[in-house]
Amino acid sequence: MAVLVIAEHSNAALNDATAKTVSAAKAFGGDIDVLVAGHNAGAAAAAAAKIAGVRKVLHADGPAFEKQIAEAMEALIVPLMAGYDALFAPASTSGKNYAPRIAARLDIMQLSDISAVIDKDTFERPIYAGNAIMTVKSADAKKVITVRGTAYPAAADGGSAAVETIAAPAGPFAAAFVSEELSKSDRPELQSAKRVVSGGRALASAEQFQQYILPLADKLKAGVGASRAAVDAGYAPNDYQVGQTGKVVAPELYVAIGISGAIQHLAGMKDSKIIVAINKDEEAPIFQVADYGLVGDLFKIVPELTEKL
Amino acid sequence: MKVLVPVKRVIDYNVRPRVKPDGTGVDLANVKMAMNPFCEISIEEAVRLKEKGVATEIVVVSIGPQQAQETIRVGLAMGGDRGILVQTDQTVEPLAVAKILKAIVDAEQPGLVITGKQAIDDDANQTGQMLAALLGWPQGTFASEIVKDGDKLKVTREVDGGLQTVALNLPAVVTTDLRLNEPRFASLPNIMKAKQKKIDMKTPADYGVDIAPRLAVVKVAEPRKREAGEKVADVDTLISKLKTAGAI
Ligand SMILES: Cc1cc2nc3c(=O)[nH]c(=O)nc-3n(C[C@H](O)[C@H](O)[C@H](O)COP(=O)(O)OP(=O)(O)OC[C@H]3O[C@@H](n4cnc5c(N)ncnc54)[C@H](O)[C@@H]3O)c2cc1C
Ligand SMILES: Nc1ncnc2c1ncn2[C@@H]1O[C@H](COP(=O)(O)O)[C@@H](O)[C@H]1O
């Protein structure tokens, strides 16, 4: 049996999600190859070769792969799958973008966002915003799977796999990258941060979000998240959204500030180890999942907490 | 340009889903159902494209039970022109949905298909991408802005690091994200007018698509329950509790 893991990377560096996906592939079993598809991505390929348990790294390099455009990923990966029993990709916005194209071309029903591998045909995945966990058995001979990042620890380094260069289709493709606007921050990345501080609608403006949430995050060396309401209102950028349709996080400490705790928000954070909620409404549903709840006005509590930490 | 908008009937997003005691699924008996929120955003975007003169006709499609007709009617009341219901009482997985949609696209020849990014019941996030691949079309997933630019469609996408813009050849598939627009409420006159609009009744067999599921549900279980913790009196207590717990 052989598994192809698709690496998530920035060309210069490998993202944590890759080693987590390798862990899920190990639970599935068989030889594990990692595909690094990128542009000038030699450094990412070298990093992938160091993950323990990887048989070899396939490195495909070309301009169309700089941003892993889905149409290009499909053209590259569909033929490769002749040699593999399963494809494992991170359930990132990138993996969610290209994996279903590959599944459809191979006539396979994709298993999205799995949280556990039971055996080579059987998997667990959350449905209904994590309000139910479904165990499904796939009848397809091959599998196309995206893996929930919080479900698996990153596989350790210690390997020394060979890197094999493979041809990258040149296109042209029917879609092209134009531009990007990435949020810049020196804080830990939301999905790999050990601590996360999130703000909700109660922050009431972008200025107050920055004034109250960021200093606390800095004190805690935490990543910053937000509820959908805070993002919709423009208090925080879209990539801060935690929840069913945003990012899923499971840090050691999650601090929810002025967030009510709608099921769609809980879906993205309720597997955090310790949850702290600060909310002026003692009936807010967030308190039903919080280990420590503080009832009161965030505009008084948060500065005091930041100062005393 | 004709625009096709597939809409799914799902549990209303305000309802807390309950797992059936026998572990076979989620209880949908007597539960309020509604249009998948992302599909409302898709309809709204199609209507705005029509108001801008980019779209000429909006066809609203649903694959599901007889009651999915109501979901199509909501789309027609928001501004859709006509509907197609592909009726079945079976569960239709995203791959089979994509195959049926492909057959409808082959027949209708739209220039653009707008799907939701995700159905809030199965949380699959794959139908639009699968349809694009089956058609050999480009895709703009998780869209927060769509602009027709000459013969291209520029789509701004919500991605993990921020925003990304891609240019798509047409025809194309777009999947909608939360920030694309705020769907309108249908007015009473438009709800009345929608009753006169035509809905074609079809079945999966009409399109020659085998909808037999590939995934057998072994069981559906409650997630691990999280116990509510304690309320603390003040910031000092919170800090000392967090220290004891090793969280800070
Ligand atoms: C299709 C769909 C997908 C969605 N996906 C997501 C998602 O991924 N993530 C997500 O977060 N949401 C998502 N939502 C939205 C979700 O349903 C809620 O609307 C949202 O989470 C509410 O955000 P909030 O808690 O910040 O705002 P509110 O619900 O308005 O809560 C604000 C809270 O702040 C408290 N408060 C007010 N003032 C103060 C003060 N001075 N001090 C302390 N507390 C105060 C209030 O008591 C209240 O509890 C989705 C919804 C839909 C329909
Ligand atoms: N049964 C269906 N009928 C019509 N459209 C559907 C159906 N299932 C999924 N879709 C479309 O595909 C999108 C994504 O669904 P999913 O891939 O299941 O998360 C939805 O928002 C709809 O636009």
Image (cartoon, rainbow, N blue to C red):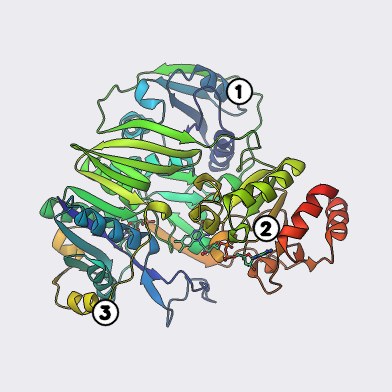
Residue at 51% over, 72% down: B17
Q: What amino acid is at disc 2?
A: Ile
How crowded pointer 3 is (Cα within 10 Å; few <14, some 14-19, many 20+) is rated as few
Q: What amino acid is at disc 1?
A: Lys
Pinpoint residue B9: horizontal percent, then vertical percent. 34, 69
Q: CA distance from mark 3 to mark 2?
A: 39 Å
Residue highlighted by disc 1: A50
Which of the 4 image quarters holds residue A101?
A: top left
Q: Chain of mark 3?
A: B
- Image disc number at residue B188: 3
Q: Are marks 2 and 1 in contact (CB under 8 Å)?
A: no
Q: Secondary structure at mark 1?
A: loop
Q: Are marks 3 and 2 on the same chain?
A: no
Q: Secondary structure at mark 2?
A: strand
Ligand 1 positioned in quadrant: bottom right
Q: Are marks 3 and 1 on the same chain?
A: no
